[in-house]
Amino acid sequence: MSLVVVGSVAYDGVTTPAGKVDRMLGGACTYIALSASYFTPVEIVAVVGEDFAQADVDLLASRGIGLEGLERVPGKTFFWAGVYSQDMNDRETLTTDLNVFATFDPKLPASYKTRPYLMLGNIQPALQKTVRDQMESLRLVGGDTMNFWINDFRSELLETLKGWDFLLINDSEARLLSGESNLKRAAEKVRALGPEILVVKRGEYGATLFHDGGCFSLPGYLLDTLKDPTGAGDCFAGGFIGYLASRGVAAGAAPAAELARAVVYGSVMGSFCCEEFGVDRFRTLTRDDIEARFQEFQKLTAF
Amino acid sequence: MSLVVVGSVAYDGVTTPAGKVDRMLGGACTYIALSASYFTPVEIVAVVGEDFAQADVDLLASRGIGLEGLERVPGKTFFWAGVYSQDMNDRETLTTDLNVFATFDPKLPASYKTRPYLMLGNIQPALQKTVRDQMESLRLVGGDTMNFWINDFRSELLETLKGWDFLLINDSEARLLSGESNLKRAAEKVRALGPEILVVKRGEYGATLFHDGGCFSLPGYLLDTLKDPTGAGDCFAGGFIGYLASRGVAAGAAPAAELARAVVYGSVMGSFCCEEFGVDRFRTLTRDDIEARFQEFQKLTAF
């Protein structure tokens, strides 16, 4: 079933111990949409500038992603640049040029409003709420956020979270949002803010799911090659919601087994993302590759 | 089948966000032996001073632990004190009084020499080798080490590792020992040094096993209460080797499924250890508690 993804489409400059790319396609919406497109029909809402390359439009279109909501306006596309640490667990931002993204006002094409699934990438919480409020018949809605919004836009974020079924954040964000250092108690407090389904992403260590039916933990995939972790969390989100949308899972009635499998597919997609710079892995990735890695996760974790 | 454990028996002073205990029973050998005693007969080799309390002897004896190799010499028992960080992932050492441990020269009672299982706690690598060389008919031998020995006693450590079937270390130690930041490649290099079976402990994030038959990863248990992580790694080791000894598993023929279950039992024992200060959890823990938590791990990880 159809999924609408809202967030940034950007250009990134990335330096990791494995190399350096000065400018490549990036942005949360891009990664989420590409990842989810392996599971379900996807349409995006985003803004780019006049410099946005046709080759990048073509890549998104080649994955069947609906681009009616991709607005092109005068100015330049959002640009971010950063450098990763030796172990790639930390990164330092060198440049953030918001450009046309500074005045991003998500406009939903009329046809999007009746779509059943909505994934809100990491943008200003009040904007996330505006989009959510325009949707008319959602089966499942949720998104991502970050420490900046948790610290400086807390009241907007709390309003926004009330309308979400799921939230994907990392463990430091879960602790920051809840004020609890114990992850289990942090999860309880975060879930009390609205999202019944919480996925705590833990980078190379995997992910943990909390919901009414209990908990599920998956360890991280052991990568042979880690070139660039940019976008891995967004690809996780894309695999997670993409899988749930493909199964028609609805809020309030999400089977534990489907949620657990969605976490595994999220981890599969996040792991592939890291194998090449930017979105490059998605130029060759097949659904068979995805199923093979899902099986690898089963072998890695069975006892 | 019988397991011999060699290492420190000590007194610890510990401060964590959950409280402070000035002096309590501790030491790697103590934790390993208590943990393993739930699975298999255990005998220890260690040294204590004249101040070692009868109540502490009684606790070890109450778990059926053989104490013929617990030497008592003039002087004071090894004392360590430290303070944990707010999230308990780091700690600072305040005091290390080696006392009688400074001249520890492990003496194996004659009856120990034919035991089939040997676990060498974290002591000077050359001493670990001396003990191993005295054993006559081992089915499985291995142990633990730390960054200090890896950095400053590397050649002794490399000699020692040649004679081990398994090694338990944490991920930063695996990276330090191998010079590799990628965990999979680090594991390959470490295993090439001797131990066919490598368990990388990752604290709250779980553990990963590498052996000839492949990999196995287990996420961390989600603790309701974390009071004191001291000894958790040693309790992991005790559960791991204790379970393998109980199953008669031998080097070169360790079934993948048994090794994976040993990692789960190790994680179970490490998680219980953290619930109370020092060894207190072992005063009430039952084998039924252990089996119940093993089942919880199955529920937490199944998909």
Image (cartoon, coloured by chain):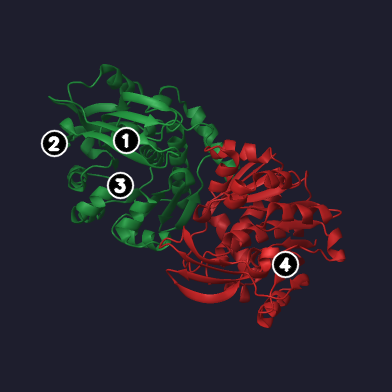
Chain colours: A green, B red
Tag 3 and tag 2, C-beta contact below 8 Å = no
Is residue A253 rendered to the left or right of residue A148?
A: right
- Which subunit holds the residue at mark 4? B
Which one is in front, A120 or B65? B65
The span from disc 4 to disc 1 (Cα, nearest Å) is 65 Å
Give the amino acid at mark 2.
Thr
Which one is in front, A205 or A136? A205
- Any part of residue A204 in sight: yes
Tag 2 residue: A103
In this rendering, the label closer to the viewer, 3 or 2: 2
Whichever of labels 1 and 3 marks the residue nearer the N terminus, that label is 1
Which one is in front, B287 or A176? A176
Quarter of the N terminus of chain A within the rendering: top left
Tag 3 residue: A142
Q: Is mark 1 on a helix, strand or loop?
A: loop
In this rendering, the label closer to the viewer, 4 or 3: 4
Whichever of labels 3 and 2 marks the residue nearer the N terminus, that label is 2
Residue ID at (51%, 47%): A219
Q: What element carries label 3?
A: strand
- Which subunit holds the residue at mark 2? A
Give the amino acid at mark 4.
Ala
Give the amino acid at mark 1.
Ser
In this rendering, the label closer to the viewer, 2 or 1: 2
Residue ID at (65%, 75%): B76
Residue ID at (23%, 22%): A52
Tag 1 residue: A2
| Label 2 CA crowd tier, 10 Å (few <14, some 14–19, many 20+) | few
Is residue A118 rendered to the left or right of residue B199?
A: left
- How far across and how far down the image is residue B22, in percent? 51, 76
The span from disc 2 to disc 1 (Cα, nearest Å) is 27 Å
